[in-house]
Image: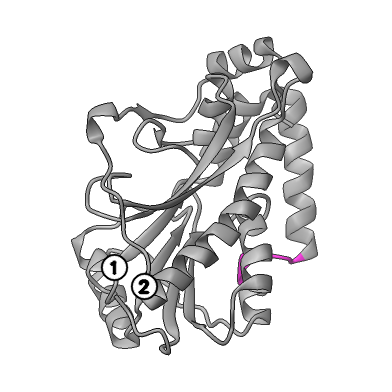
Amino acid sequence: MSDGDHKLRVLIVTEDDPLYVIKFFEVFFAEYPKDRFDLIGITVDEAFHEPITKTARRMWGFYGPVDFVRVGMRFAMAKLSRRSILTLATNAGVKEVPCTSVNDPGYIERVRAMNPDVIVSVAAPEIFKKGILESARLGCVNIHSGRLPVYRGMMPNFWQLLHEEPCATVTVHEMVEKLDAGGILDTLEVPIRPISQGGDALDRLIVETKRGGARLMISVLDRLRTGSIQATPIDMSEKKYFSFPKPADVKKLRKLGHRML
């Protein structure tokens, strides 16, 4: 795929999340090999692409009143600290590439002019369409905190907890027009604390999959750089899709003995 002496030109697309997605970047920016990767830019998009009031209602239904207040306080403190993915990127010398949509023709034209080898999606809040998918020499790769194709969709860590999986599987895969259907480049398993041992917290699991996922992504990108990695096609006959959990799903999770925070 690539010359081993060539610095991999990487463009990152992510969402503005000061609580969880930022955990990925705390590790990624600290540990990526600067002699082998050239981070040519980062696009930090809005989470959910909806009014803040709608997001708040969604989070209220998800967490319930007590945990909603706790998460809200964390969010407020993070905002007050002015520590964000963009500030981490700036401190790492990575320039911002702003956009209103990754599928906007103007953004795609700008990206192509930057000549990226690969575009990395980390919790990007939009579905990538053909134009952006074809904008990098090696294509686009995504990191997903669930085993594919079973845990396609939203909040895979939650669903893996609810279904009493022994591990949460982090998957780095190629991006294609069909959601979560591209070939798998590598995976990582993060053990889930069993209910027999007091259960686990969704909060802990998300943080650990983000941190472990950052190191997995670094490894995958390094192998893409040298052409020493090959994607494994996904068997879509096992595919499932999960939407955002409803309050009844959260109630089931808590009844099992797991926690949200």
The x, y position of residue 21, in whole percent, is: 60, 54
Q: Nearer the viewer, residue 60 or 212?
A: 212
Residue name at image x 46 percent, y 53 percent: 143
Q: Nearer the viewer, residue 22 or 198?
A: 198
Question: Which residue, as the protein is rendered here, is positioned at the far front?
Answer: 228
Q: Main secondary structure of the magenta part?
A: loop
Residue 12 visible, this orientation? no
Q: Nearer the viewer, residue 199 or 259?
A: 199
Q: Are marks 1 and 2 in contact (CB under 8 Å)?
A: yes
Residue 73 visible, this orientation? yes
**Left or right relative to 43: residue 25:** right
The x, y position of residue 6, in whole percent, is: 41, 88
Residue ID for mark 1 = 139
Residue name at image x 74 percent, y 32 percent: 261
Residue name at image x 69 percent, y 21 percent: 194
Category of crowding for the residue at label 2, using alpha-carbon neighbours closer than 10 angstroms: few (below 14), some (14–19), many (at least 20): many
Residue ID for mark 2 = 118
User: Is residue 2 positioned above or below 64 on the image?
Assistant: below
Upstream in sequence: badge 1 or badge 2: 2
Give the extent of the magenta segment: 82-86
